[in-house]
Image: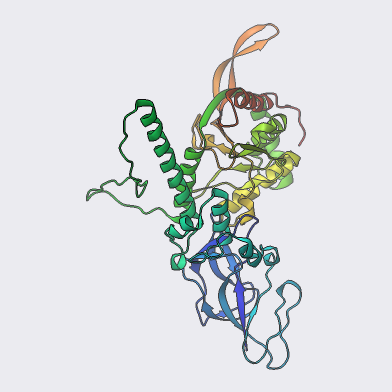
């Protein structure tokens, strides 16, 4: 028999670690090829890790709630092997030579060859003499934020064996920056008034404690809700939010969809919703105003080449996820509709892949689905803007005709845009939003899909 190392596979270009949420197989269990061994969660989506081989699970290297780096061994599987002949699997599931001594061998998993060379990184890293192990992601954040070795070593880790996780170092940086800003403000006041200001003691936690009485129910946030909470707080702390609104007459769009939806469903086997129509209009406006399709790095504005639109989707458990339609401007309306339906279905079924939520450059959210007329959404960092549409309602409106103005019943809708005022001013944000509304209002009623 031979033993086999199962490595945590690469799950996306920007995903370097995952948290084990559930083991579906226990030591001693028989495993068939493609059986799911464990469930993991990244900072974006939940995923399953299947076994590429048949055998018996011998060892679980990590327990539930522990964080594992991509490429680390998560399990040991006993497989059949010959005493003297090597055991070899073909192509991507190739197994190196195995002898009767039951030496551990690595399983070649697609994508692992793309992992960064951590040995080379360590050699040139300023944190090579650290007091404890730091993942490449943590080291990269430390370098980017200018943390010294001493600062990094002082961070209290919440990961396995006290390791510093991404959340730990980001929380430290946020606290350090806020403390630094407070101290500078105090020093400025002191200099202007000539008085000595009291010393400020850094707070140990930004958490506000509340007292629950005996009749209150305390509900602990699940992992995804905690991530959402941290992400929202970070966005508000990072970006000065500004919000603009416009009202659009989408009567032509509504009537056109009502006219084509039955034939479309019969032909394509699925519904055409309003979402792909909105996303097409947003994609066109982003091409017209590329300085909305950006992210900000310090005092640098990064203008994105690709238009990748995330669509906020509510999950059955009440949480939120934002799958991304890549290169939305290059897709036809049929292609957009199929992408929207596919991502929505896989979101609800918890079948999204990590790459499905990566690399978004702009976010769209349909709050009208819940009967809301308008809202002020929070920017999905590191993007610079997010657009929300409200419910479509019939309202009396003034219609301009060649024979004069008249009152008619029209399908009206509010659009709102939250944007980062560090790079997007009111003129740009407001003009972009009006352009989206114009594309929706001027919908071609005779369009063929």
Residue found 43% across the figure and 41% down from its top: 180
Q: Position of residue 212 (x, y in %)?
A: 26, 48
Rendered view: 333 above or below 224? above
* Residue 83 visible in image: yes
Q: Position of residue 446 (x, y in %)?
A: 76, 28
Residue found 73% across the figure and 44% down from its top: 335
Rendered view: 80 above or below 248? below
295 relative to 202 in the view: left or right: right
Depth check: give the residue in front, 10 or 335: 10
Depth check: give the residue in front, 199 or 47: 199
Quarter of the image where the N terminus is located: bottom right
Figure quadrant of residue 302: top right
Residue found 57% across the figure and 46% down from its top: 322
Rendered view: 142 above or below 276? below
Outermost residue to the left: 214
Q: Position of residue 206 (x, y in %)?
A: 37, 46
Q: Position of residue 142 (x, y in %)?
A: 54, 54
198 relative to 129 in the view: left or right: left
* Residue 317 visible in image: no
Depth check: give the residue in front, 372 or 436: 436
């Amino acid at each position: 028999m031979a033993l086999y190392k199962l490595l945590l596979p690469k799950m996306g270009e920007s995903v370097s670690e995952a948290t084990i949420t559930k083991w579906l197989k226990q030591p001693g269990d028989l495993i068939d090829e493609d059986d799911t061994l464990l469930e993991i969660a990244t900072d974006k989506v939940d995923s399953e890790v299947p076994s590429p081989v048949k055998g018996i699970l011998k060892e679980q290297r990590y327990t539930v709630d522990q964080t594992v780096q991509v490429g680390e061994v998560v399990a040991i599987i006993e497989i059949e092997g010959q005493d003297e002949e090597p055991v070899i699997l073909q192509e991507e599931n190739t197994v190196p030579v195995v002898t009767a001594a039951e030496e551990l061998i690595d399983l070649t998993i697609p994508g692992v060859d793309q992992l960064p060379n951590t040995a080379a990184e360590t050699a040139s890293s300023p944190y090579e003499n650290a007091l404890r192990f730091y993942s490449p992601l943590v080291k990269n954040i430390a370098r980017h934020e200018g943390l010294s070795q001493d600062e990094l070593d002082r961070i209290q880790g919440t990961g396995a064996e006290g390791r510093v996780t991404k959340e730990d170092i980001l929380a430290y940086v946020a606290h350090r920056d806020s403390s630094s800003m407070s101290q500078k403000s105090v020093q400025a006041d002191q200099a202007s008034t000539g008085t000595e200001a009291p010393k400020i003691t850094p707070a140990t936690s930004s958490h506000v404690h509340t007292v629950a009485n005996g009749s209150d129910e305390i509900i602990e946030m699940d992992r995804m809700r905690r991530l959402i909470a941290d992400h929202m707080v970070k966005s508000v702390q990072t970006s000065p939010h500004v919000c603009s609104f416009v009202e659009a007459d989408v009567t032509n769009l509504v009537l056109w969809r009502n006219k084509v939806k039955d034939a479309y469903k019969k032909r394509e086997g699925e519904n055409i919703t309003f979402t792909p129509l909105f996303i097409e209009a947003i994609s066109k406006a982003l091409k017209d105003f590329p300085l909305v399709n950006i992210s900000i790095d310090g005092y640098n504005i990064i203008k994105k080449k690709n238009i990748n639109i995330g669509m906020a989707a509510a999950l059955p458990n009440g949480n939120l996820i934002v799958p991304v339609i890549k290169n939305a401007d290059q897709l036809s309306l049929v292609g957009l509709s199929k992408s929207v339906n596919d991502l929505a279905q896989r979101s609800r079924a918890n079948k999204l892949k990590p790459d499905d939520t990566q690399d978004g450059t702009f976010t769209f959210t349909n709050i009208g689905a819940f009967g809301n007329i308008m809202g002020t959404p929070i920017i999905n960092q590191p993007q610079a803007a997010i657009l929300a549409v409200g419910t479509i309602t019939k309202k009396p409106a003034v219609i301009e005709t060649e024979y004069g103005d008249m009152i008619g019943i029209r399908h009206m809708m509010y659009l709102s845009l939250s944007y980062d005022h560090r790079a997007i001013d009111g003129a740009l944000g407001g003009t972009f939003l009006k352009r989206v509304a114009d594309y929706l209002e001027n919908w071609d009623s005779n369009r063929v899909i």
